[in-house]
Image (cartoon, grey):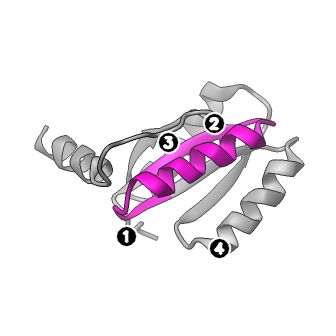
Amino acid sequence: MDNPRKVTIVIPTYKNLKFLKTTVNSIFMTTDYCFSLLLVICLEDKETLDWANQLKEAYENVDYILSPKEGSIKALNQGIRWAIEQGAQDIYCTQDDVLFHPYRDWLRDYVAYSEKE
């Protein structure tokens, strides 16, 4: 199935729910551009999985995949492969990034710039 959203923001996470919530909130608060959010959750992280299920029910553009505990780079690569398979560009965020931007078009500008290249 082709992803109708051009951009997937990929966030690998492992047992850091407090900061992950802040990261996800900052993404939703700083753009109104159409995007997908993919959480790559370690199989051992039940607390984050429970929260991700609630998030997925609340937002149609949120999804997650489960990853074995093999490190953040392997989890990131798994998320990027997923995004590409869905037909989307990808953006990587760590589980403790907080986005502050003076205007809500940062993601739209990112996509416009990347399409010029």
- Mark linked to residue 44: none
Question: Which amino acid type is marked by label 2?
Answer: Gln
Q: Are marks 3 and 1 in contact (CB under 8 Å)?
A: no
Q: Earlier in the sequence, mark 3 or mark 1?
A: 1
The local secondary structure at tag 4 comes to helix
x and y percent of residue 41 in the render? 73, 45
Q: Is residue 108 above or below residue 42?
A: below
Q: CA distance from mark 4 to mark 1?
A: 18 Å
Q: Which residue is mark 4?
A: 58
Q: Which residue is mark 2?
A: 95
Q: Is residue 22 rendered magenta in the image?
A: yes
Question: Which amino acid type is marked by label 4?
Answer: Ala
Residue furthest to the left in view is 116
**Which residues fall within the magenta stretch?**
8-36
Q: Earlier in the sequence, mark 4 or mark 3?
A: 4
Q: Residues within 10 Å of mark 4 (few under 14, many from 20)?
A: few
Q: Nearer the viewer, mark 2 or mark 1?
A: 2
At horizontal 18% and vertical 49% (from top left) the residue drawn is: 112
Quick one: 61 or 85, which is closer to the camera?
61
The local secondary structure at tag 2 comes to loop
Would residue 37 be found to the left or right of residue 22 on screen? left
x and y percent of residue 7 in the render? 38, 54
At horizontal 33% and vertical 59% (from top left) the residue drawn is: 6
Q: CA distance from mark 4 to mark 2?
A: 20 Å
